[in-house]
Image: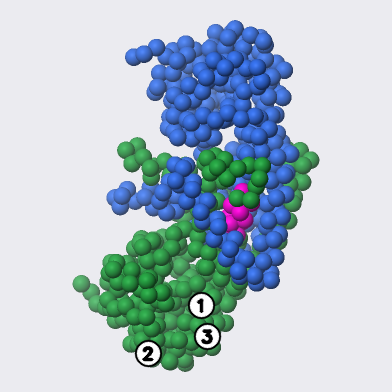
Chain colours: A green, B blue
Amino acid sequence: MPNPMFDRIALIGIGLIGSSLARKIRQENLAGEIVISTRSQETLARAAELGLGDRYLSDPAEAVVEADLVIVSVPVGSSGAVAELIASSLKTGAIVTDVGSTKASVIAQMQPHMPEHVHFIPGHPLAGTEKSGPDAGFAELFENRWCILTPLEGTDEAAVERLAAFWRGCGSNIDTMDPQHHDMVLAMVSHLPHIIAYNIVGTADDLETVTKSEVIKYSASGFRDFTRLAASDPTMWRDVCLHNKDAILEMLSRFSEDLASLQRAIRWGDGDKLFEMFTRTRAVRRSIIEAGQEIDAPDFGRFVASHPEKR
Amino acid sequence: MPNPMFDRIALIGIGLIGSSLARKIRQENLAGEIVISTRSQETLARAAELGLGDRYLSDPAEAVVEADLVIVSVPVGSSGAVAELIASSLKTGAIVTDVGSTKASVIAQMQPHMPEHVHFIPGHPLAGTEKSGPDAGFAELFENRWCILTPLEGTDEAAVERLAAFWRGCGSNIDTMDPQHHDMVLAMVSHLPHIIAYNIVGTADDLETVTKSEVIKYSASGFRDFTRLAASDPTMWRDVCLHNKDAILEMLSRFSEDLASLQRAIRWGDGDKLFEMFTRTRAVRRSIIEAGQEIDAPDFGRFVASHPEKR
């Protein structure tokens, strides 16, 4: 077996992303040793039961000692606190990265704590499911997904390339961009969809003319699609909303403007306009399938997944 | 083999729903003869190539002759025209039903044309995928889905029960309700989700700060979920918007009100409110899975569907 890519990787946070990384690191021999730390004793004990790492430590400062790569996988609102805790224990030349869904805020929180002798390279793997916790992770989570790195000016290029190689080893494709652009893009492709999904599920839950049991029973007619994103981790998504506020408000305002226009077309019975709006959106899905970012099966492959005998 | 449930079934319209019915009727021997009619010559020829029926006729009036069950599966805006065309050819005692997503409008369009000697029973199977056309149908489409019947006052109960038995034979569960309530329920669980999905995909398509290629590449972070509903048949959905206007406008207005409140919580950084809103929606998905209306696998089972070896 070739030498592992890193001698020691420290995973701070062992939820869906952290535990998927742990599994993939082991599978691909990306680290000689995996050290895991997380704040909750219960989660740490579960990670140990699952055998996700080699050592398990409550104290993140202890966990990062002698680590060549430190991956912080916590809700973005906790990044600053973690950075402060680990700062003085980081090894010279270590790469410190994160997986947070917002980048400008994470940089503002973490960078002030980072010593000169480490390479701090913010990152964001665009991968996940609606599940959370160490049991929910799986090694293939990052397969053919994009990981965006947002290195700061003056960052050592060899270190960036080393981190990119790590993510490629996890199955990801790599892009780099500046943090502000990342936050704008993600506000559109990820944050807005989640917020809209949470909102529509909340609207349905509040109705009095339609009962909850009707919403549940008849959900296969469209509604259930939104319940997946709306089942995502509330702490993570609260923090995203608090830490990418400006870009999210901008996207929300465009969405609402467009919705007002669509609503007007419905009110005035403008069939041609509705037809045009409902036609152009078809091409977007086709492109996503062609880009390998969506399954090419009707209904997200639900039927295939639940009827293995029909494959 | 037992006698078929109906001697002759006429299917007017042979898209996703009509062609799924044709396949299931054959599989379960629900009809002695399947007669298919649709307006497009090309679609009719394709239905014949697929062997979906026993006879194929351009003229719907000819197709319904001697049929015991007539199922109209066309965009809801065309229901009135079809009803007018077939009215004088309907057999005495025939059951005439439809599969339209709106019920009050379909009744207003069709009932005036229906002769006294037939049983007109509006219906709506809550089943579908984002695909359309005769190739997209499959026999299992209605399996464990709900079919809502909205019989008019004074309708023969035996005829309603016969139609219910037919849908149960297709694998559906049956509910009956009044047309107005149906339209209100569906505006929430189906029409609003589709409109919101069309809208968000349109918003993304219009942005200039985020490129189309970025939207496509990074869509797995949430956005792609919405592209499925937004890839649905534009004619069908234009008609739904035009024919269930009041209920849709009511649901849109509630949705927008809730979204304004959520937006305000984001603007003012009200983390507690966001956390509360994002927490209660999780339970809704759990209930849908428990009700057997959603697959109990992360990410809609996409991973399972695309990695059969990992099952």
Near-viewer residue (A157 or B180): B180
* Chain letter of disc 3 in the image: A
In depth, the one of B275 and A34 nearer the eye is B275
Q: Does the magenta portion include A198?
A: yes
Mark 2, residue position: A91
Chain of the residue where label 2 is placed in the rendered structure: A
Return the x and y of residue A224 as percentages of the image width and height: 53, 47
Residue B191 location (% of width, % of height): 63, 41
User: First in sequence: mark 3 or mark 2?
Assistant: 2
What amino acid does circle 2 point to? Lys
Pointer 1 residue: A78
Side of A273 relative to A146 (left or right): right
Query: What whole-number distance in Å separates the C-alpha atoms at marks 2 and 1?
Result: 22 Å
Binning the other alpha carbons within 10 Å of mark 3 as few (below 14), some (14 to 19) or many (20 upward) gives some
Of helix, strand and loop, which one carries label 3? helix
As drawn, the label of residue A111 is 3
Alpha carbons under labels 1 and 3: distance apart: 13 Å
Residue lying at 69% horizontally and 46% vertically, measured from the top left:
B251
**Would residue B126 be counted in the magenta stretch?**
no
Q: Nearer the viewer, mark 1 or mark 3?
A: 1
Residue range of the region highlighted in magenta in the rendering: A194-204
Amino acid type of the residue tagged 1 in the rendering: Ser
